[in-house]
Image (cartoon, grey):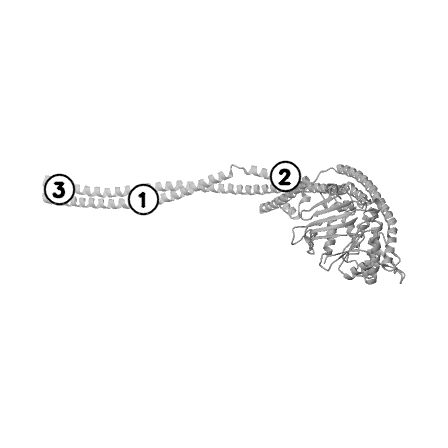
């Protein structure tokens, strides 16, 4: 391929710039910042487009923004090219609209035949059979960019190997190898994959093995849990037996206390009955004494009345006698009537006075007797009331005692106590081994018939036992829930699944082995191919480098990965290219690019050599030798040199035929 003409409507600082090229040597001259590198980038952009995206980490703008003109809406242009078969094409690009058109020699738009709408920048690769990466690493030499980056040399070698085998860099063992690797990755899996069939099977097998181990552990743990559950249940049963025994002891102590209380109440009842009998006797005696006192007082009153009545009768008799004597004296005129009347009147007066005195004394005596009688009666009533109150209190106490007894019989209680005691002693013998020394001592006291103070101890013992039962029942429930939640998957089913997956894994291992064999075989074949073309390329490299260095170095070679070694004629040792001076290194890599172009790329379009300041680190002799060799190259393929050195332009124009285009 050769470039006939290019026109820049707008690209970077270039605007409405046109340039025609010869088929041989072309020199583009311009001062620094005149647009040489921009024009060189324009040539590549016409073939492969400009990359978009965001700014890089170093702040560098992407090509689409870096070369966009500041003062023009025109961003694009065209380039006329001629292929080795003589066909002429015009590539027309509008970078602003991201549009490309391809025209033939008659200006027919044949874009659809060469342009993939999914990647419009692939037109250059379609026309010349060389992609952008390989173009930049072979015939497109940027300023200070002669050297081939060793980090990308493996990719370059692979692409060169592709071309050497098939004539196309995208049809090669690499794609076949990648297809095999993809099949290996997709259908089987690799050491770095995680989601492929073999990975899934291995992961599943690992999970099943872990699950099997876990199930075995769960089974063992389940057995341990069941044994623990059984042991807890046994302890609970023992504690419940102990609790029942303690409950019987509590009943025994309560009945003993009840019997003792009943006996005490019986004694109290007998005492109260005796007391009530005495109170009843006291009341009877007091009532009789009251009656006797009333009768005695009444008798004394009658005697006094009778005594007074006798005196009065005597006085009346005397008065009557005197009166009778007076009457007789009057009748019989024995005494003077007056004499007779005087004693009569005296007796009558005396009788009247006596009657009045007696009546007064009788009232006083009656009043005194009534007061004395009332006092004695009041005393008797008070003592009778006190005894009756005591009597009723005793009756109420007796009734209360009888009611509290509930009709219980001490004989029945004694029989019940005896029955419980026998039961306690029987249970004591059965639980002898489960009793603590303190509990055994406690049981001995029961066996001896003691019960005072043992009720509280039995209650405390039972309380602690019930707490232990509650704690063990909680633990039992926890263990039971754990047993319930423990997986019950069948180990047999898991082993069957492991066997099935193991067979699948074996099959995939066989497939992986077959694919690896194919990949290795293809790799070995590619190595053999490289070994075939490397000697040819080394011959061109050696001749080119020898010419560039005026036959100073006659033996320079590159290995499979483009690692360059040369034979130092002075020391007679092999040295790597990195040990040489910068100028010599540039010469070697220029020779390598020429060797690649003349050997590897000869099956494709013969691409123009485009170089930006290729002699920057050359002295005059090296520059002249390089120019001579480049002129020889230009006889076979187009060469375009960009330079800012007027000296080089003058040297080239004076010594060699060329076409010069100035940017200044």
x, y percentage for residue 123?
74, 45
Pointer 3 and pointer 1: residues touching (CB < 8 Å)? no
User: Is 317 located above or below residue 589 in the figure?
Assistant: above
Q: Is residue 414 visible?
A: yes
* Circle 1 or circle 2, nearest the eye: 2
Q: Is residue 106 left or right of residue 345?
A: right
Secondary structure under tag 1 reads helix
**Residue 499 numbered tag:** none
Q: Is residue 427 left or right of residue 193?
A: left
- Pick the front one: 368 or 374: 374
How far apart, in angstroms, are the residues tagged by discs 3 and 1? 50 Å
Residue 107 quadrant: top right
Q: Earlier in the sequence, mark 3 or mark 1?
A: 3
Q: Which residue is mark 1?
A: 374
- Pick the front one: 428 or 284: 428
x, y percentage for residue 351?
18, 44
Q: Earlier in the sequence, mark 1 or mark 2?
A: 1
**Residue 326 numbered tag:** 3
How far apart, in angstroms, are the residues tagged by discs 3 and 2? 118 Å
Pointer 1 and pointer 2: residues touching (CB < 8 Å)? no
How far apart, in angstroms, are the residues tagged by discs 1 and 2? 71 Å
x, y percentage for residue 436?
66, 47
Q: Which residue is mark 2?
A: 423
x, y percentage for residue 75?
68, 50
Residue 297 quadrant: top left
Q: How many marks?
A: 3
Q: Residue at x 88, y 53 (%)?
A: 539
């Amino acid at each position: 391929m050769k470039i006939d003409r290019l026109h820049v409507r707008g690209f970077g600082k270039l605007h409405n710039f046109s340039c025609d090229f010869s088929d041989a040597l072309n020199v583009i001259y311009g001062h620094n910042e005149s647009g040489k590198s921009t024009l060189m980038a324009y040539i590549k952009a016409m073939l492969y487009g400009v990359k978009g995206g965001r700014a890089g980490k170093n702040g560098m703008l992407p090509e689409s923004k870096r070369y966009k003109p500041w003062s023009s809406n025109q961003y694009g242009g065209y380039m006329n090219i001629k292929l080795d078969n003589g066909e002429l094409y015009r590539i027309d690009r509008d970078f602003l609209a991201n549009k490309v058109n391809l025209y033939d020699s008659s200006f027919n738009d044949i874009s659809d035949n060469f342009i993939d709408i999914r990647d419009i920048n692939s037109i250059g690769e379609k026309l010349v059979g060389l992609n952008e990466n390989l173009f930049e690493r072979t015939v497109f030499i940027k300023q200070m960019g002669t050297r081939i980056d060793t980090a990308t040399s493996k990719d370059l070698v692979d692409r060169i190997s592709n071309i050497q085998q098939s004539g196309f860099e995208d049809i090669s063992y690499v794609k076949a190898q990648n297809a095999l690797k993809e099949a290996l990755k997709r259908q089987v899996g690799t050491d770095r994959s995680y989601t492929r069939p073999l990975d899934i099977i291995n992961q599943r097998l690992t999970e099943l093995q872990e699950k099997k181990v876990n199930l075995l552990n769960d089974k063992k743990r389940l057995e341990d849990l069941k044994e623990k559950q059984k042991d807890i249940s046994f302890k609970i049963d023992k504690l419940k037996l102990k609790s029942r025994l303690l409950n019987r002891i509590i009943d025994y102590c309560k009945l003993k206390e009840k019997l003792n209380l009943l006996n005490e109440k019986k004694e109290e009842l007998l005492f109260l009955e005796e007391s009530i009998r005495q109170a009843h006797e006291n009341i009877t005696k007091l009532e009789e004494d009251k009656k006797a006192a009333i009768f005695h007082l009444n008798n004394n009153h009658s005697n006094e009345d009778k005594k007074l009545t006798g005196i009065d009768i005597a006085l009346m008799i005397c008065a009557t006698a005197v009166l009778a004597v007076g009457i007789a004296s009057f009748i019989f005129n024995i005494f003077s009537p007056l004499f007779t009347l005087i004693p009569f009147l005296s007796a009558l007066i005396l009788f009247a006075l006596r009657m009045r005195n007696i009546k007064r004394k009788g009232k006083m005596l009656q009043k005194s007797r009534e007061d004395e009688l009332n006092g004695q009666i009041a005393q008797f009533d008070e003592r009778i009331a006190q005894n009756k109150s005591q009597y009723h209190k005793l009756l109420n106490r007796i009734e209360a005692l009888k009611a509290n007894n509930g009709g219980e019989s001490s004989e029945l209680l004694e029989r019940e106590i005896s029955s419980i005691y026998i039961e306690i002693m029987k249970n004591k013998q059965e639980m002898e081994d489960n009793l603590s020394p303190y509990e055994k001592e406690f049981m001995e006291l029961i066996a001896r018939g003691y019960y005072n103070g043992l009720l509280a101890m039995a209650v405390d013992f039972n309380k602690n036992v019930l707490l232990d039962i509650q704690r063990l029942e909680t633990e039992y429930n926890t263990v039971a829930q754990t047993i319930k939640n423990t997986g019950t998957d069948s180990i047999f089913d898991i082993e069957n699944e492991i066997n099935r997956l193991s067979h699948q894994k074996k099959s995939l291992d066989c497939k992986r082995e077959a694919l690896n064999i194919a990949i290795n075989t293809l790799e070995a074949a590619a190595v053999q191919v490289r070994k075939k073309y490397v000697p040819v390329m080394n011959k061109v490299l050696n001749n080119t480098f020898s010419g560039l260095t005026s036959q100073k170095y006659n033996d320079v070679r590159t290995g499979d990965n483009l690692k360059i070694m040369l034979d130092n004629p002075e020391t007679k040792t092999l040295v790597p290219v990195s040990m040489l001076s910068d100028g010599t290194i540039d010469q070697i890599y220029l020779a390598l690019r020429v060797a690649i172009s003349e050997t590897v790329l000869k099956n494709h379009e013969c691409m123009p050599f485009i170089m930006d300041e290729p002699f920057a680190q050359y002295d005059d002799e090296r520059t002249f030798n390089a120019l001579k060799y480049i002129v020889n190259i230009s006889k076979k393929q187009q060469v375009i040199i960009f330079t800012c050195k007027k000296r080089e332009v003058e040297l080239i124009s004076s010594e060699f035929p060329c076409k010069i285009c100035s940017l200044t």
